[in-house]
Amino acid sequence: MAEVQQYPTVGWTPIKNISDPHVIEIAEFAVKENNMQLGLSLELKAVLRGTTQVVSGTNYRLLLKVTDGTSAKLYYAVVFEKAWEGSLVGRWEPIKDISDPHVHEIAEFAVDEFNKRINAITKLKLVAVVSGESQVVSGKNYRLILKAADKITTRTYQTIVWENASLKKELISFKPFLG
């Protein structure tokens, strides 16, 4: 998301209905993704206007009114969507096969990264992946519920790992699961 500036209009078509639920979903995704990546807490107030561009998917360029708790600001957001992949941008969808080796690799990565961050003497070891969801973003988020154990106890945790197209991973969160 970027503060308002001039963008070229060649190849872009105005969105006729900016109140369309899918357009709002795209806007909410843009604000949420921006908040996650930059550690902000902006809140979407309105989609003021927008355009789309058909490429190998659809680009959405939206003018958004957001607040940071005290003041309103205008931002442009550009979101790329591949609707044919069966995933709506920003929507969490259940992982059908949690026994998939790639899901296990994501869980192992989360536990390893958590161990590095806490620098504890007793490290956690992955016991099992209980359930999971994925979310298409600029890459993919994996939200997993997993069991991990140290030498004394086994506990349940919720973790979110982001992975980009080149399989680079980043641990977003790792916390006890209370639900």
Image: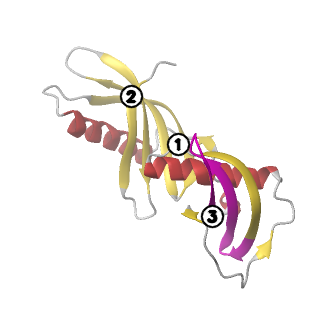
Q: Which residue is at 66% across, 49% downward?
A: 28
Q: Which mark is residue 97?
A: none
Whether residue 53 is visible: yes
Q: Which residue lies under the disc numbered 2?
A: 175
Which residue in the structure is indicated by mark 3?
76
Residue 95 within the magenta-colored segment of the rendering = no
Label located before the other in sequence (2 or 1): 1
* Relative depth, front residue between 137 and 107: 137
Residue 75, picture quadrant: bottom right
Q: Which residue does the numbered mark 1 point to in the structure image?
A: 41
Q: Is residue 137 left or right of residue 82?
A: left
* Element marked by disc 3: strand
Please tell me how crowded label 1 is: few (under 14), some (14-19), or many (20+) other residues with Cα within 10 Å: some
- Amino acid type assigned to the residue bearing label 3 in the image: Tyr
Q: CA distance from mark 2 to mark 3?
A: 33 Å
Label 3 CA crowd tier, 10 Å (few <14, some 14–19, many 20+): many
